[in-house]
Image (cartoon, grey):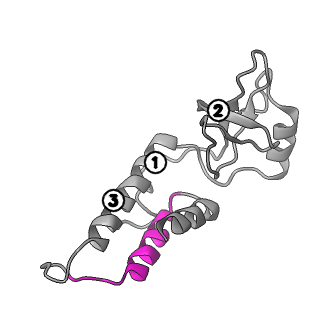
Amino acid sequence: MQSGGPTAHLIHRAPGYEAGQTSIVGAPTHAMRPAGISDKRGRRLTLCGTLAFPVARNYSDLAPGACLTCAAVQTVRPSAQPVRLSADLAAVRSLIDQAAIEASRSERSEHPVRPAGEILYDLIERVAGITDVNVIAQMAEAAA
């Protein structure tokens, strides 16, 4: 594994939050929280606590119609991670697939069999280069 995780080779992008919209026409654009579970409709919590649908662009507090509460929270707690949704998701899925293959090996496999806890620890360590601690904790809970 390369230093800095599986997305370290990508061009550096400025940190930021993903934008989100509610289904109400003319409603403000919100900043999505970087980690969280979507509801049945695909909405996640925003920085201000609203449920919104993620949209494929970065949140900007300077854009007309930006949520003032999200803008205030962003000022106090700027994102430490760049928004690279597709690249990050693909990298995390790849790491999960590799861990699943390794965890499913039988004793008769020509490859060494490792304990599940060790595989999970390595997965969490690798993912740490991609995303934040909240997502890692959720992945660990889902794997248990």
Kindly identify which numbered label has been placed on residue 97: 3
Residue type at numbered disc 2: Phe
Image quadrant of residue 8?
Answer: bottom left
Residue 75 place in picture, x, y as percent: 83, 46
Segment colored magenta: 112-130
Foreground pick, 60 / 107? 107
Magenta span: predominant SS is helix
- Residue located at (76% from left, 24% from top): 63
Foreground pick, 132 / 35? 35
- Say which element carries label 1: helix
Say if mark 1 contacts mark 3, CB within 8 Å: no
In the image, is residue 56 part of the stretch drawn in magenta? Answer: no
Q: In the shown orientation, is residue 97 left or right of residue 29?
A: left
- Residue located at (70% from left, 34% from top): 52
Q: Earlier in the sequence, mark 2 or mark 1?
A: 2
Which mark lies nearer to you, 1 or 3? 3
Residue corresponding to mark 1: 89
Looking at the image, residue 96 lies above or below residue 82: below
Q: In the shown orientation, is residue 112 left or right of residue 52?
A: left
Q: Which of marks 1 and 3 is nearer the N terminus?
A: 1
> Mark 3, residues whose alpha carbon is within 10 Å: few (<14), some, or many (≥20)?
few
Residue 136 place in picture, x, y as percent: 56, 64
Image quadrant of residue 27?
Answer: top right
In the image, is residue 123 part of the stretch drawn in magenta? Answer: yes
Residue corresponding to mark 2: 53
Looking at the image, residue 65 lies above or below residue 97: above
**Disc 1 to disc 3, how far (Cα)?**
12 Å
